[in-house]
C-alpha cells in the first residue's frame, strides 16, 4: 500500500500518545492516520530518547511502564532518520538562526529535508521560530 504524505512530529506530540493531556486527541488523529497508511510519520531517531526521558519523569509511570511505552513507540514504525552531512548542516544552521537547541532544530531541519511540515505542541518553540515548516498540533485537525 502506498503511504500518504510525510509529516514530521516532535517529541512534544509523541508524548501525548502516552500521557493524556491537552491536544492528545489531535496527536492521536495523526498517529491513527499513520497506522491506517494515510500519512507517514517521520522523526529524527532522537525522538525515542526524548519521549523516554519525558515519560521517565511522569509521576504516573514506573520503569516497566516506560519500557512498555518505548516498545509501543517503536512498534508504530515511525520513519526514523539518523543524521547525514546535509541534514546535520541544516540542523546547526537552524539552531543558530532561531537561537534554539540542536534537539529542536533536528525536527525542523528534517522537515525541510523531507519537504514536509513538523507538528509540535511546544509553544515556546513556536514563539522563537517563524518558519512555515513548523506548525502547532492544533493545526493538524484542519
Image (cartoon, grey):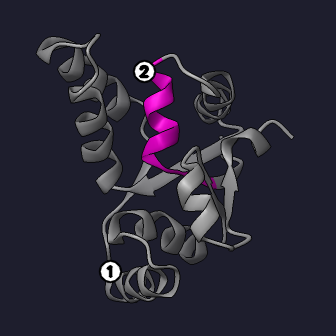
Q: Residues within 10 Å of mark 1 (few under 14, many from 20)?
A: few
Q: Is residue 17 above or below residue 110?
A: above
- Say which residue appears at 48% left-offset and 50% top-offset: 10
The quadrant the C terminus occupies is top right
- SS of the residue under disc 2: loop
Which residue matches tag 2? 18
Gap between marks 2 and 1, in whole Å?
Answer: 30 Å
From the top left corner, tell me how far across and down residue 3 is, in percent.
66, 46
Residue 77: horizontal and vertical position, in percent? 42, 38
How many numbered marks have been drawn onto this rendered protein structure? Answer: 2
Percent position (x, y) of residue 134?
65, 63
The picture quadrant where one finds residue 60 is top left
Q: Is residue 17 magenta?
A: yes
Q: Nearer the viewer, residue 26 or 71?
A: 26
Residue that numbered label 1 is attached to:
84
Q: Residue at x 23, y 27 (%)?
A: 57
Residue at 78% x, 45% y is: 139
Q: Nearer the viewer, residue 13 or 72?
A: 13
Q: Residue at x 25, y 35 (%)?
A: 52
**What residue span does the magenta drawing correspond to?**
7-19
Assess whether mark 1 and mark 2 are in contact (beta carbons under 8 angstroms).
no
SS at circle 1: loop
Q: Is residue 71 above or below residue 77?
A: above
Q: Is residue 124 magenta?
A: no
- The crowd level at tag 2 (other Cα within 10 Å; few <14, some 14-19, many 20+) is some
The residue furthest right is 142
Q: Earlier in the sequence, mark 2 or mark 1?
A: 2
- Say which quarter of the image contains residue 118: bottom right
- On the rendered image, what quadrant is the N terminus found in? top right
Amino acid at each position: 500500500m502506498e503511504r500518504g504524505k510525510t509529516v514530521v512530529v516532535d517529541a512534544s506530540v509523541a508524548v501525548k500518545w502516552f500521557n493524556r493531556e491537552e491536544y492528545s486527541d489531535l496527536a492521536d488523529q495523526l498517529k491513527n492516520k499513520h497506522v491506517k497508511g494515510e500519512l507517514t510519520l517521520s522523526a529524527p531517531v532522537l525522538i525515542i530518547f526524548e519521549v523516554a526521558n519525558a515519560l521517565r519523569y511522569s509521576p504516573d509511570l514506573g520503569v516497566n511502564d516506560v519500557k512498555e511505552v518505548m516498545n509501543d513507540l517503536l512498534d508504530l514504525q515511525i520513519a526514523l532518520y539518523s543524521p547525514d552531512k546535509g541534514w546535520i548542516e541544516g540542523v546547526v544552521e537552524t539552531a543558530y538562526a532561531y537561537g534554539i537547541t540542536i534537539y529542536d532544530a533536528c525536527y525542523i531541519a528534517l522537515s525541510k529535508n523531507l519537504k514536509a511540515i513538523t507538528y509540535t505542541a511546544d509553544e515556546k518553540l513556536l514563539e522563537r521560530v517563524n518558519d512555515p515548516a513548523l506548525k502547532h498540533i492544533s493545526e493538524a485537525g484542519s
